[in-house]
Image (tube, rainbow, N blue to C red):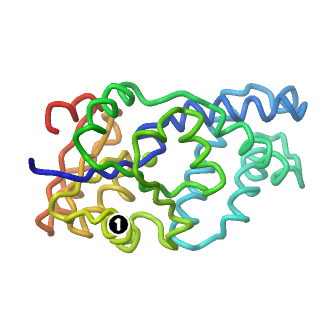
């Protein structure tokens, strides 16, 4: 067998972060009695989504702290939505993070694929999410039983794409690097990170617009590790 150990990203690879985040924020706003004040929820969520992505990139590059990210993403998006609520960022964040791990939507094919793979491979999670929500997400969604270990960046002290988190995960699992495979939906964090560490990777890319440019693939192929691109998780069953 080519691989013995599989390392999965969690958000948007197995747990449907985008759908769950949409539902959790809607619930949080509703419970705080703020839903009517923000106008059209879909439009607000698009703004929030873009702001959150940008701030997460800054957080991943250590340019802002987690505490700043948590509140600022709401303050900034509410301001851009022309419904500013100064001072509400942290409260809304708290309500949102309370709802978040209770959401159960999974990426299509996740359970079928994990059911098949977990008898055949040692499996673990490598995630950059917040410690206080990632484990609860795994428990509530029924995903936890498939994995021997969960490596959370905050606990390891390094985020994907940093080599240190892949190194730590592989060592902790006693996994030979050459027999290890990283599976994730983030080109920059999961794929480039694992590749630079020297591990093979599967890029799960359900949206054609997120396919990497040919020059990015070429640029990141300086190591011998191979990259496979899939558009549906069930394609893993053909290759593993
Ligand atoms: Mg992800």
Q: From this view, report whether residue 151 is shown above or below residue 121.
A: below
* Viewer-proximal residue among 148 and 189: 148
How many discs appear? 1
Residue 45, compared with residue 64, is above or below; it is: above
Of residues 178 and 56, which is closer to you in this image? 178
Q: Residues within 10 Å of mark 1 (few under 14, many from 20)?
A: many
Which percent across, then down, holds residue 223? 15, 68
Q: Nearer the viewer, residue 133 or 217?
A: 133
In terms of image quadrants, where is residue 235? top left
Q: Secondary structure at mark 1?
A: helix
Nearest the eye: 33 or 44: 33
Name the residue tied to disc 1.
166
Expressed as whole percent of the image width and height from the top left, the position of residue 56 reads 57, 58
Residue 214 spot, x, y in % from top left: 18, 51
Name the residue at 71% across, 45% down. 97
The residue under the point 48% across, 41% down is: 144
Q: Is residue 54 left or right of residue 34?
A: left
At a point 51% along the width and 64% down the height, the residue shown is: 153
Image quadrant occupied by the C terminus: top left
Q: Quadrant location of residue 35?
A: top right
Q: Is 46 displayed left or right of 145 in the figure?
A: right
- Residue 82 location in percent, x, y? 80, 41
Q: In the rendered image, which quarter is residue 194 located in?
A: bottom left
Q: Residue at x 61, y 50 (%)?
A: 52
Q: Is mark 1 within 8 Å of ligand 1?
A: no
* Left or right: residue 86 compared with residue 213: right
């Amino acid at each position: 067998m080519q691989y013995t150990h599989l390392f999965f990203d969690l958000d948007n690879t197995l747990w449907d972060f985008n759908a769950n985040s949409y539902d959790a924020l809607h619930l949080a706003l509703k419970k705080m009695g703020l839903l009517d004040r923000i106008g059209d929820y879909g439009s607000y969520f698009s703004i929030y989504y873009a702001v959150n992505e940008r701030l997460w990139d800054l957080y991943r590059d250590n340019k802002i702290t987690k505490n700043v990210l948590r509140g600022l993403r709401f303050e900034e998006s509410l301001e851009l939505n022309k419904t500013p609520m100064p001072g509400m960022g942290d409260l809304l964040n708290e309500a949102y993070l309370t709802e978040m791990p209770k959401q159960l939507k999974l990426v299509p094919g996740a359970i079928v694929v994990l059911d098949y793979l977990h008898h055949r491979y040692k499996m673990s999670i490598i995630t950059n999410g917040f410690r206080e929500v990632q484990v609860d997400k795994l428990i509530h969604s029924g995903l936890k039983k498939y994995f021997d270990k969960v490596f959370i960046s905050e606990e390891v002290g390094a985020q994907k794409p940093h080599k240190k988190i892949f190194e730590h995960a592989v060592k902790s699992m006693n996994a030979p690097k050459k027999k290890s495979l990283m599976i994730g939906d983030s080109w920059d964090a999961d794929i480039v990170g694992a590749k630079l560490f020297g591990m093979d990777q599967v890029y799960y890319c359900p949206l054609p617009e997120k396919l990497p440019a040919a020059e990015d693939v070429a640029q990141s192929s300086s190591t011998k590790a191979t990259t496979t691109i899939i558009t549906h998780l069930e394609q893993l069953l053909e290759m593993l």
